[in-house]
């Protein structure tokens, strides 16, 4: 299967705009589930406003949130796909810049020291483009995640030690949720990375935070932690926007990797309630858009 | 818990009448301000030509579209999506905003900390919480971008919005030392032990 890079550029543009405007169905269901359980009247009103906002964005064809985020593109390449990898990355980058200028919407990306904004959502190393592979032969998948800064600013890594055990992981997650309070725009998806190296651990946390609601960690130990931590963080009373209530998080998601005999790393990365993502799948029959 | 309908600007007595749990709806003028705006105003000696006395500022950097100047778009910008950012990064600017520019109300999400609470108490002001991430809805309360200053910092310019029925916003910190965020934080610390027990951490 050959990939037309002009189509990739168009998809990279389209995906950013789609992600900013339409919330995936699993997140909408997550809102409904929280609203059914919420016992605090104020929190219930806030959830109602968040749900109303999703509808307003759809009805007015507007962005859900003003934060257009840091653009992240996750790419999975099928084993039967022929593509020039460098040109693929260029096409994604160009599509990302075009979406910002042509829609237009806010470029939220600046140089880290000069703070100069190129006004097209790109810069050194941005958009983030993660390349991986898929077993499906004739498929190229591109997922776009506009990662909001309110939640991204609440990211932590702790290089715990083996003697601290799993207790260190659990305590760390609880303390991060308390520390974040309302700053992450709760209800959140709390992404937890367990194991790996320092950088892999943080990447796992990001993967966990941006995974669809209702999915489970493939590692049974990780899945067990997810269930326990999801119940525990919603006992803290942080609530929507940090103003109190039961609905602190939609879920805690965990991703794991093996680690060194001397290490016990844990990372937390959060996703806000505007848990946006969009997906394009290229197959021989054409491009299909989804979440 | 009272509801307050304000036509901006307001005076000190109106700001001091606000109590946590009250709600507020704003009309007429609202200023948008952000990290870079305030870094340039308070750390780099930039000045704005706007008169902020008695006004509300919202922590924002909107999505706008450049258009021809007209009665509907006096600044040559159409508002596309106006939302709110996390306030706490801008904690140290609350006092100078109030002291040097006479700002009365700060609107944002996630809350401010102790230094802002002290400034609200001393100088007569309040923090109004908006629901973060609900920008599509918030945009329907914005009639126009009337003016813009310090636009070299775009999108972190100093924006002058004309608003109608902007709210209801929740008074989350008042001039009497009360803060909903502090209450939730303190309660959270107390609930931490229970959560850890449930996790079998001991």
Image (tube, rainbow, N blue to C red):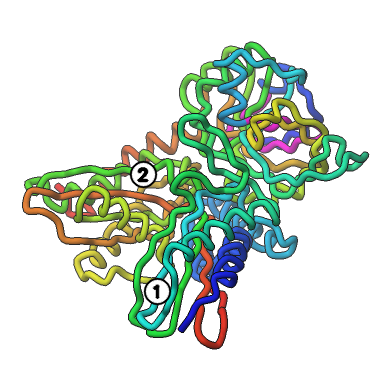
Q: Classify A43 as above or below B52.
A: below
How many numbered dots are placed on residues in this image?
A: 2
Residue at 16% in and 61% down: A258
**First to last magenta residue range:** B17-33
Residue at 66% in and 50% down: A105
- Disc 2 secondary structure class: strand
User: Chain for mark 1?
Assistant: A
* Quadrant containing the N terminus of chain B in the rendered view: top right
Same subunit, labels 2 and 1: the answer reads yes
Distance between the alpha carbons at the discs numbered 2 and 1: 29 Å
**Is A174 in front, or is A270?**
A270
What percent of the width, then of the height, locates residue B82?
Answer: 69, 44
Pointer 1: what residue? A77
What percent of the width, then of the height, locates residue A95?
Answer: 58, 60
Say whether marks 2 and 1 touch (CB < 8 Å). no
Q: Classify A217 as above or below B1.
A: below
Front of the two marks 2 and 1: 1
Q: Is residue A200 left or right of residue B72?
A: left
Q: Earlier in the sequence, mark 2 or mark 1?
A: 1
Q: Is residue A180 left or right of residue A28?
A: left
Q: Is residue B65 left or right of residue B97?
A: right
Pointer 2: what residue? A155
Q: Is residue A150 magenta?
A: no
- Disc 1 secondary structure class: strand
- Residue B95 visible at all: yes
What percent of the width, then of the height, locates residue A48?
Answer: 61, 57
Q: Is residue B74 left or right of residue B45?
A: right
* Label disc, if present, on residue A235 of the rendered structure: none
């Amino acid at each position: 299967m050959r990939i037309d890079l002009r189509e990739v550029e168009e998809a990279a543009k389209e995906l950013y705009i789609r992600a900013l405007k339409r919330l995936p169905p699993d997140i909408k269901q997550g809102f409904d589930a929280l609203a059914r359980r919420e016992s605090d009247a104020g929190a219930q009103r806030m959830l109602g406003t968040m749900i109303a906002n999703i509808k307003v964005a759809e009805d007015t064809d507007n962005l859900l949130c003003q934060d257009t985020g840091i653009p992240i593109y996750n790419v999975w390449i099928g084993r039967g796909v022929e593509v020039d990898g460098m040109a693929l990355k260029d096409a994604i980058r160009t599509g990302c810049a075009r979406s910002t200028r042509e829609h237009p919407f806010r470029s939220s990306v600046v140089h880290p020291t000069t703070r100069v904004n190129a006004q097209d959502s790109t810069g050194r190393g941005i958009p983030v483009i993660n390349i991986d592979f898929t077993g499906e032969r004739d498929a190229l998948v591109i997922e776009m995640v506009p990662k909001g800064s309110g939640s991204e600013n609440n990211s932590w890594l702790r290089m715990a030690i083996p003697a601290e055990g799993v207790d260190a992981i659990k305590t760390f997650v609880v303390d991060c949720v308390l520390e974040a309070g309302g700053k992450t725009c709760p209800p959140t998806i709390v992404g937890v990375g367990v194991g790996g190296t320092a950088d892999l651990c943080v990447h796992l946390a990001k993967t966990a935070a941006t995974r669809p609601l209702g999915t489970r960690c493939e590692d049974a130990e990780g899945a067990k932690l997810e269930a326990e931590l999801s119940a525990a963080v919603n006992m803290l009373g942080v609530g929507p926007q940090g103003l109190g209530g039961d609905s602190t998080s939609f879920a805690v998601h965990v991703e794991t990797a093996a680690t060194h005999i001397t290490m016990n790393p844990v990372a937390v990365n959060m996703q806000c309630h505007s848990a946006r993502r969009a997906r394009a799948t290229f197959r021989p029959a054409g491009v299909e858009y989804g979440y | 818990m009272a509801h307050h309908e304000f036509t901006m600007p307001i005076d000190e007595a109106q700001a001091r009448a606000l109590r946590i749990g009250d709600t507020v709806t704003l009309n007429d003028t609202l200023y948008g301000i952000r990290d870079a705006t305030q870094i340039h105003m308070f750390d780099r000696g930039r000045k704005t030509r706007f008169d902020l006395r008695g006004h509300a500022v919202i922590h924002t950097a909107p999505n706008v579209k450049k258009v021809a100047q007209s009665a509907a778009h006096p600044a040559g910008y159409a508002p596309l999506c106006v939302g709110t950012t996390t306030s706490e990064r801008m904690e140290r600017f609350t006092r100078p905003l109030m002291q040097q520019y006479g700002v009365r109300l700060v609107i944002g999400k996630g809350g401010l900390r102790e230094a802002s609470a002290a400034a609200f108490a001393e100088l007569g002001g309040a923090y109004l919480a908006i629901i973060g991430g609900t920008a599509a809805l918030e945009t329907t309360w914005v009639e126009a971008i009337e003016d813009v200053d310090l636009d070299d910092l775009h999108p972190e310019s100093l924006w002058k919005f004309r608003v109608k029925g902007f709210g209801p916003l929740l008074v989350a910190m008042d001039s009497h030392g009360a803060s909903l965020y502090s209450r939730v934080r303190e309660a959270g610390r107390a609930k931490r032990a229970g959560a850890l027990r449930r996790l079998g951490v001991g």
